[in-house]
Image (cartoon, rainbow, N blue to C red):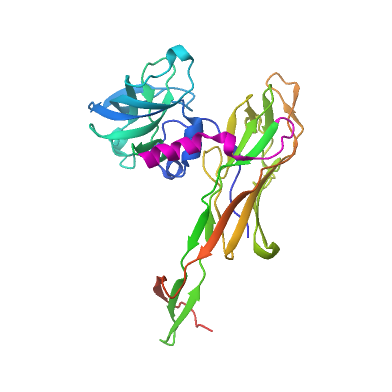
């Protein structure tokens, strides 16, 4: 009963296509990583143009096809720039975004349409005046009161469930949906003897906590994410003291020597994310059969390596210790099977049923 996943403190994301990775990025992560968040009306979209850009998260520039779009700002929800360089309401801003015509990648999001009102979570491009819209679904929303409220909520990291600081670091959880409604499933299966068997199955509850780590000190803090140097555990506590534990860690590689690139540094005040699958921004999936009632999940991160070789060959100290988040509460409730059921597609048996 383990999640086969890895853990990483993420770097910035950049020009990925709308891949499975991009589709997994929760709005909480996109809101924290964005430099500018605006709501407004898309006034124009130019024809795709080949450009050479170094997008956020990339180490070097690369060629691609981009759309140049213009938006008139109705409201600014976030801007990390100094006062003089901030976007203002009523201002027309230009942003670039990858297009589906780049290399024939049809997975890239559809182009913004002129005349539509949207909420955009944008990044700044070094050395350019245009902003950048990543090809990540959670960076684009329809401009309506519900979407604006959802993005505002996602930005409020001060309301996340942060635990006590250890070595200058805190681990926290973004708020979860208050309820996870489930529908009983009707499974029909035909045995080799030709008879059908029917049974009611309780589906697993799937929660996807966004686990964050932040530096609350006034100095950079480094941790090692080399296999075996860290662990992340999700602990769920439910009715009658029931506990479900999921460990997220990468097994030590016997032939894999320590790599300095596995050391992640978090700057003062920075918020990064702990997730599975390597250096990506995503939530940590947890799927388990949970009984009805109130539950609470907590994330526990442990860093073990105390020092690592520095760039100049000298040893540098790393943060160690166990850091826990505060608990995030949620409710599991199964619908009355007499009123709501889900029929699962019948399957024929491949072996003789009992």
Residue 256, image x, y percentages: 66, 40
Residue 301, image x, y percentages: 68, 42
Q: Nearer the viewer, residue 130 or 349?
A: 130
Taking the image as shown, residue 282 lies to the left or right of residue 111, namely: right
Residue 22 in which image quadrant = top left
Q: Nearer the viewer, residue 69 or 231?
A: 69
Split into 4 quadrants, where in the image is the C terminus?
A: bottom right
Residue 79, image x, y percentages: 46, 23
Image height of 210 relative to 178, above or below: above
- Magenta residues (range): 145-168
In the displayed orientation, state which residue is furthest to the top: 84
Give the mark count.
0
Residue ID at (46%, 77%): 350
Image height of 174 relative to 341, above or below: above
Taking the image as shown, residue 42 lies to the left or right of residue 310, namely: left
Residue 186 in which image quadrant = bottom left
Taking the image as shown, residue 172 lies to the left or right of residue 180, namely: right
Split into 4 quadrants, where in the image is the N terminus?
A: bottom right
In the displayed orientation, state which residue is furthest to the front: 145
Q: Is residue 28 magenta?
A: no
Residue 53 in which image quadrant = top left
Q: Nearer the viewer, residue 237 or 275?
A: 237
Taking the image as shown, residue 321 lies to the left or right of residue 120, namely: right
Residue ID at (34%, 42%): 107
Q: Is residue 164 magenta?
A: yes
Looking at the image, can residue 225 be seen?
A: no
């Amino acid at each position: 009963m383990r999640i086969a996943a890895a853990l990483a403190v993420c770097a910035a994301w950049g020009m990925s296509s709308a891949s499975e990775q991009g589709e997994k990025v929760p709005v909480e992560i996109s809101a924290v990583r964005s430099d500018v968040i605006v709501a407004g009306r898309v006034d124009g979209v130019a024809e795709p143009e080949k450009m050479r850009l170094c997008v956020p998260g990339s180490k070097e520039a690369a060629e691609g096809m981009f759309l140049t779009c213009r938006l008139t700002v109705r409201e600014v929800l976030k801007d990390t720039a100094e006062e003089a360089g901030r976007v203002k309401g009523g201002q027309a801003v230009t942003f670039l975004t990858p297009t589906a015509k780049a290399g024939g990648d049809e997975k890239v999001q559809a182009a913004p349409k002129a005349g539509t009102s949207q909420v955009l979570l944008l990044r700044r491009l070094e050395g350019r005046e245009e902003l950048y819209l990543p090809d990540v679904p959670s960076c684009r929303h329809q401009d309506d009161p519900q979407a604006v409220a959802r993005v505002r909520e996602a930005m409020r990291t001060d309301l996340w469930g942060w635990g006590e600081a250890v070595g200058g670091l805190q681990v926290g959880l973004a708020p979860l949906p208050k309820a996870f409604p489930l529908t009983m499933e009707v499974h029909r299966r035909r045995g080799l003897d030709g008879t059908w068997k029917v049974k009611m199955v309780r589906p697993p509850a799937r929660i996807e906590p966004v686990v964050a780590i932040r530096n609350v000190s006034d100095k950079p803090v480094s941790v090692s994410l080399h296999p075996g140097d860290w662990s992340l555990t999700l602990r769920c506590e439910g009715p009658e003291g029931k506990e479900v534990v999921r460990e997220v860690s990468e097994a030590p590689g016997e032939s894999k020597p320590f790599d300095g690139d596995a050391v992640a540094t978090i700057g003062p005040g920075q918020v990064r994310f702990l997730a599975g699958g390597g250096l990506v921004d995503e939530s940590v999936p947890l799927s388990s059969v949970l009984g009805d009632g109130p539950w609470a999940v907590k994330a526990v991160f442990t860093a073990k390596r105390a020092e690592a070789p520095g760039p100049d060959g000298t040893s540098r100290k790393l943060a160690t210790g166990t850091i826990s988040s505060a608990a995030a509460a949620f409710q599991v409730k199964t619908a009355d099977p007499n009123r709501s059921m889900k029929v699962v597609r019948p399957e024929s048996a491949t072996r003789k049923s009992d």
